[in-house]
Structures are given as C-alpha cells and as structure tokens.
Amino acid sequence: MISLDVATDRLLHRVSYRQAFLDGRFDELDLAAQDIEALQCIDRQQLIETAESVRSALLQRKHRGSGGIHATWPTTLAAWQASHDDESLELFLDAFMESEAFGCYQEVPHAGGGLSMEEAVYCFFEAMDTGDAQVREAEFLAGLCKALALNTRPSFTVGPPLRRAPAGWFAVSRRGAPRLFAALAGNYVSGELTPFLADLLVSDQPHSQVAASHAVAAAVVDAAVARFTSLGLLAPPPN
C-alpha cells in the first residue's frame, strides 16, 4: 500500500494512475479503503485541469541555466515528436512523467539527492533510444553543465560522466569525436578535443604515460597541462 500523499502526487503526474481513479478502478490505486474514501471528495474536473497545468508548467519551466526542456533538447525532442506524431508534446510529457527517471527527479524538492531535470530527461531518452545517440549525449552534457555553471552547490546528484575539477565540473563526450563540456568558475565552456587531450583529462594514468601512448612530445604535454590548469580543469602540479 502507498500513502495518501504518494497517491495524490501520482494523480497529478501519472496519467494511467489518474485515469484509473477517474474510471473508478480503485483496486488499481494500491490504497487502503479509508484513503480511497478520502479521495472521493476530489473534484474530478479540477483534478484534470490541475494535472494539465502541472504538465504545461513542466514543459515551459526554465531549469536554472539550461533553459528548459525545449532549449536543452531541440534535436532529440524533435526526434521524439517525429516518431510519435506528437506535435503538442503531450505524449512525451505523459510518458516522461510515468517513467522511473521522472520519479528520481521528483525526489529533489523533498529529500535532495535526486536526479537533475537534465539527467532525468536524458535517462528517459536513453531508455527509449530516442534520436541520435551522439546528439543525445551532447545535448545532455551541454544542458547539465550550463545548469552547474549557475549552481555551484547543486541540490541534485552529479555523477559520471561528470567529473570534479578545481574550478567546477567537466565531462568528455564518449560518443563520436571527443568534446569538452564544463562548468568552470560560473561559466559554461565547450570545445573539441583531440584524443590525446581527452585522455589527458580523464585517464588515471600519469601524464607521461598518456603522452607516450599518443607519441606526444614532453613540451606539448607541459603546454596542455598548463592550459588545463589555467582553466581550472586540472590542479596545479605539486611543487
């Protein structure tokens, strides 16, 4: 059995749960008899209108520095619409709010430590294999790093592929040519990387071994390390 609070949340966010309630299929609500009775006082039309407002607000909301779902996922969202004949994005929002990823995002306001909106949408698109995988990853990393640029102490969890840096956070794309995405000292930074520079940032090997594996001269390594250090991507070498 779930609590009445959880049921109320599901009524607003999960279309299948809400429809079961509206249809009177109370045995599908996973509630105690007294809680089902308590729900009977809900105005059905008001519930529908409120749920529609919640869905609309989710789509229009500006999420910190990333600009919201439309701005963060222009290509991947378009791919979803094309594959689902969903010009209004209602199907996308309904499916997303039913997903496990959205449930993890919802934990943030109440308990902290949940997914960011950017990562929740990414996990949803990943599970659905929506659009091009390389574009999907790039849109996610760009959106999350823009959010982190404005949130130096995020309330949401930040995990791989994001890495801590002296001046903030960074990630190197894993699909296609390597590219840097970073939130450094309150600024969003992005740019192409050579395979050597990508390995220099993410490899656990000493810089000398990374250089040897790419046949790079010591002077080039020193210049790259100095540049990354000045950006706040790497810590200064010990004296």
Image (cartoon, grey):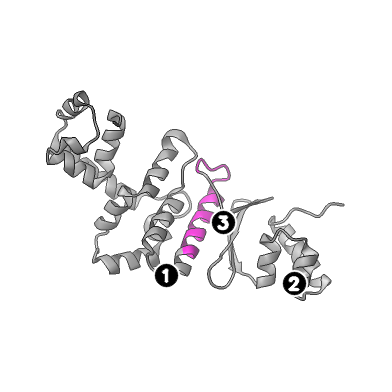
Look at label 3 and name its amino acid.
Pro
Look at label 2 and name its amino acid.
Ser
Mark closest to the chain's N terminus, 3 or 1? 1
**Residue indicated by mark 1:** 132
Instruction: Tell me, yes or no, whether the highlighted magenta stretch contains residue 146.
Output: yes
Point 14% across, 40% down: residue: 22
Residue 162 visible in image: yes
Spot occupied by residue 83 in the image (x, y as percentages of width and height): 29, 68
Mark 1 crowdedness (10 Å alpha carbons): few <14, some 14-19, many ≥20: few
Q: Nearer the viewer, mark 3 or mark 2?
A: 2
Element class at badge 3: loop
> Position of 135 compared to 167: left or right?
left
Mark 3 crowdedness (10 Å alpha carbons): few <14, some 14-19, many ≥20: few
- Over which residues does the magenta segment extend? 137-156
Look at label 1 and name its amino acid.
Asp
Question: Which part of the image, by quadrant, shows the N terminus?
Answer: top left
Spot occupied by residue 90 in the image (x, y as percentages of width and height): 25, 56
Q: CA distance from mark 3 to mark 1?
A: 18 Å
**Residue indicated by mark 2:** 213
Q: Residue 231 bears which disc, if any?
A: none
Q: Nearer the viewer, mark 1 or mark 2?
A: 2
Point 25% across, 34% down: residue: 30
